[in-house]
């Protein structure tokens, strides 16, 4: 029974289609998105900006996820979980600057395999946000 819960949780971390959401980096719509790489939270006095996906609201705060497509946040070929790269870490700094009052943190559900090539590529890739 615990194994089935574990498998369901792992499956929820993988890229999937999300209604009315697009990748925050490239703006791609109707593409599978990873929602657990970067998460956010803010008080209910702040309206959640359009590219962010609100997941829950309680105790005066809203929690949610930053959608990233398979191109901007590739899945691992072994486990299919999204890969956390150095570029993703740069993205948190950019999001924090763009959306004042919202706290961004790394989420769960990331691949734990070693991905040297993806890390190396992300060193030279400039990170920007899509104009939505």
Image: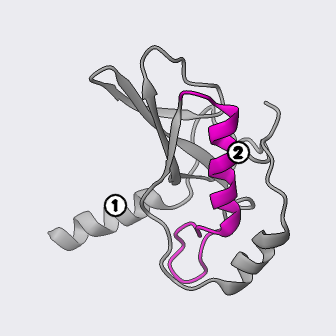
Badge 2 element:
helix
Q: Nearer the viewer, residue 6 or 86?
A: 86
The CA span between labels 1 and 2 is: 29 Å
Q: Please identify the quadrant where the N terminus is shown.
A: bottom left
Q: Closer to the camera: disc 1 or disc 2? A: 2
Q: Dot 1: few (<14), some (14–19), or many (≥20) neighbours within 10 Å?
A: few
Quarter-of-image position of residue 127: bottom right
Q: Tell me which segment is drawn in magenta.
A: 74-101
Q: Position of residue 30 (x, y in %)?
A: 70, 43
1 or 64: which is nearer to us? 64
Q: Give the answer, above or below, for where 49 lies relative to 127.
A: above
Residue at left offset 17%, top offset 69%: 2
Which element carries disc 1, helix, strand or loop?
helix
Name the spot of residue 117 as percent of width and height, x first.
73, 84
Q: Residue furthest left?
A: 1
Location of mark 1 (residue): 9
Residue at point 22% right, 73% down? 3
**Residue that extends furthest to the top in the rendered view of this protein:** 45
Determine the residue positioned at 28% across, 68% down: 6
The disc at residue 36 is: none
Q: Is residue 23 left or right of residue 113?
A: right
The structure residue drawn at horizontal position 62% and vertical position 50%, both measured from the top left corner, is: 92
Residue 72 position (above or below residue 52): below
Residue 127: in magenta span = no
On the image, the x and y values in percent for residue 32 come to: 63, 53
Q: Can you see residue 23?
A: no
Q: Quadrant of the C terminus?
A: top right
Instruction: Give above or below for 62 relative to 117.
Output: above
Q: In the rendered structure, which disc, 1 or 2, sits on the residue that comes first in sequence?
A: 1
* CA neighbours of label 2 inside 10 A, class few (<14), some (14 to 19), many (20+): some
Numbered badge on residue 94 = 2
Question: Which residue is at the front of the view, 89 or 107?
Answer: 89
């Amino acid at each position: 029974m615990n194994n089935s819960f574990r498998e369901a949780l792992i499956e929820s971390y993988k890229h999937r289609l999300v209604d009315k959401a697009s990748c925050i980096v490239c703006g791609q719509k109707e593409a599978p998105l990873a929602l657990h790489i970067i998460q956010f939270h803010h008080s209910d006095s702040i309206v959640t900006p359009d590219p962010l996906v609100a997941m829950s609201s309680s105790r005066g705060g809203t929690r949610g996820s930053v959608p990233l497509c398979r191109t901007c946040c590739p899945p691992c070929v072994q486990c299919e979980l999204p890969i956390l790269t150095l570029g993703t870490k740069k993205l948190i700094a950019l999001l924090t600057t763009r959306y004042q009052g919202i706290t961004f943190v790394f989420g769960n559900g990331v691949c734990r395999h070693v991905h040297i090539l993806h890390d190396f590529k992300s060193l030279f890739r400039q990170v920007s946000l899509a104009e939505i």
